[in-house]
Structure formats: C-alpha cells, structure tokens
Image: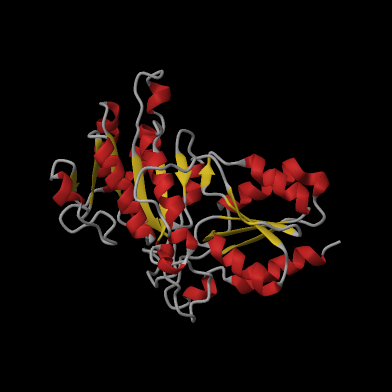
Amino acid sequence: MTMIQALRSALNVMMERDDNVIVYGQDVGYFGGVFRVTEGLQAKYGKSRCFDAPISEAGIVGTAVGMGAYGLRPVVEIQFADYFYPATDQIVSEAARLRHRSAGDFSAPITIRMPCGGGIFGGQTHSQSPEAFFTHVCGLRTVMPSNPYDAKGLLISSIENNDPVIFLEPKRLYNGPFDGHHDKPVTPWSKHALGEVPEGYYTVPLDKASVFRPGSAVTVLAYGTMVWVAQAAAEETGIDAEVIDLRSLWPLDLATIVESVKKTGRCVVVHEATRTSGFGAELVSLVQEHCFFHLEAPVERVTGWDTPYPHAQEWDYFPGPDRVGAALRKVMESV
C-alpha cells in the first residue's frame, strides 16, 4: 500500500468497527479528499458518517470537540497543515483542556489529520511543518509517521485514544520513500517492505519510537521524511549511524533516545521545520540533560532555515542528505 492507501484502510477499519467514528473536512466526502485519502468512504458509509465541511477550520475542529464530548470519535482533516491557524483556539483552549477543565467528566477523543511538509513545490502556504506548536500544548498528542505500515497502525491507535491527537502526514511520503535526492526517480511503496500493510486491524503504540537503522557510531533523531534522509546520509557517508524514528513526538519515547545516545556517545537531530524553537531544540536539551556524561561531541542540529518555505529555492531550504552528512562527519571528527 501507499501511505494514502494505508491511511484510507485505517479509516475504513475503524469506521467498520465503531459506528461512533465519523470523518469530515473540506472535500473529504464526495471528492475523497485533495490527496484521495478518504476516497470511497462516503459511498460505503453514507453522508452522515463521511461528509464535506465548509471552509472553516475553526468550525471543523470546534464541532469535533463537541461531538467528542458527546461520545463520537471524529476524524477531521485540515486540508494542509498550513491552514490549522484559524482553528488554534479550538485546538488549544478547548480540545486540549477539556478533560482538565471538566475534572474528567468530558474528553475530546478527536483525531485531526494534517498533511504537512515540503518537497512538492507547494511554496510557503502548502509546505509548513508546524509540529512544535502542538508539542508545546499540554493535553495534545502529536504523531508523524514515516511509512505506510506505521501510518495505518498509528492512525488506528489515534482514533481509539481518548486524547485529542494531531496526526501529521508528510506529503512527500504519500507515494513512496524520499531520501532527499529530488533529481532521482521515486521508488514506489510497492517496492518497499514497509509498503506491505495488513488489510485488517492492528495498532502501533503512540508513545514508542522505532530503531529504524541500527548503528553504533552516532545517533540520529528524526521523524517523518527526515528518517529517510538520515538513512541516506548514513549510507552515503559510510558512518555507522543509528537512526531513531520518533513516530510520536509527544508523548516522547525518551528511554529509546537515551539508550541509543548512551551507546553511541554522539547525536544529530534532524527536522524539516524552521530551526529556531523547532522541536529539535527540545530534543537537544533532553539529550544534554540525560546523556551529558556520555557525549563525546556537542549535539548537532540540521533543520530548515528561519524563513518562509521558498518555492523557487525549495532544495536549498530542504535538509537533504548532504547537510545531514556534513553534520555526521562533524560529530565524528570532534574529540
């Protein structure tokens, strides 16, 4: 399966298992979503369980909070992650706080899907990676898969969870893994082991990272598209890097991170979002706090630049394998 098909399969499995699961957002009904993730769901489950919403992100999320409080499990789509800002008050002040404010009487078991990231020439309004906004909000879970198998399992876990989950989907990975070499042909998921996705029900834990590539020389912390870029950088430099796919940004699997860094003694953090106050800063801080006496070199950080995502200079902004490779060499040369 492609990641698109895996996500659709997850929605289908959960809609079939639980009548309280409903799906809606802009163009997700008849049209099947701008990326076709929800294609066929309205025809199968009807207009009361998969339907279109007006162009109002605040309205989409606000109604989902109310539905969740009354026992439904809405899965709503923000067409691009760049468009979540009008819904910020509903996400931060309502969904994330509802259980605390009601002393546990109500919860918001909602999943908010958002295609994110660049690499598709979407420009500044269709390429953002806003994950750090959500990890800063108490009461939200934030997830970003890197492959179809994890995408399906994580989405099912998100829908079943009683917390509001921000489910970020790297657009560049929808149809195949991407290692940052934009000038090379795309390898489809059908030719990759992680494209082999079971048809039925299964889950991937929301709070467990994956050792994507075992290694002993340096730890690379990454998520989403950057997992594949990090793997390419390790292979191209010949450095025995251990790549950790975080999968869940919050809650964070700190134990896996600490175990790896204490083993390797070196760490590189990679993300596509802008550098300043990005989630990588939190990762660097945690590594320093928990692994300081095991570090053989300062932690390196490879990120997007502090600028709106440029259309014409997309690949100058995108953290590719050359920049990650340079960081790997730098930490290995430090004494």
Given residues 325 and 98, the one toward you in this image is 325
Quadrant of residue 172 within the rendered picture: bottom left
Residue 97 visible in the snapshot? yes
Horizontal relation, residue 140 to residue 38: left or right: right
Percent across and percent down for residue 47 are: 13, 45
User: What residue appears at the point 37 percent right and 35 percent down from the top-left corner?
Assistant: 160
User: What residue appears at the point 37 percent right and 60 percent down from the top-left corner?
Assistant: 1
Percent across and percent down for residue 52 are: 17, 50
| Position above or below: 263 against 238 | above
Looking at the rendered image, the quarter that the C terminus falls into is: bottom right
Given residues 243 and 222, the one toward you in this image is 243
Percent across and percent down for residue 275 are: 58, 59
Horizontal relation, residue 161 to residue 77: left or right: right
Horizontal relation, residue 251 to residue 191: left or right: right
Percent across and percent down for residue 314 are: 47, 74
| Position above or below: 172 against 183 | above
Quadrant of residue 232 within the rendered picture: bottom right
| Position above or below: 65 against 76 | above
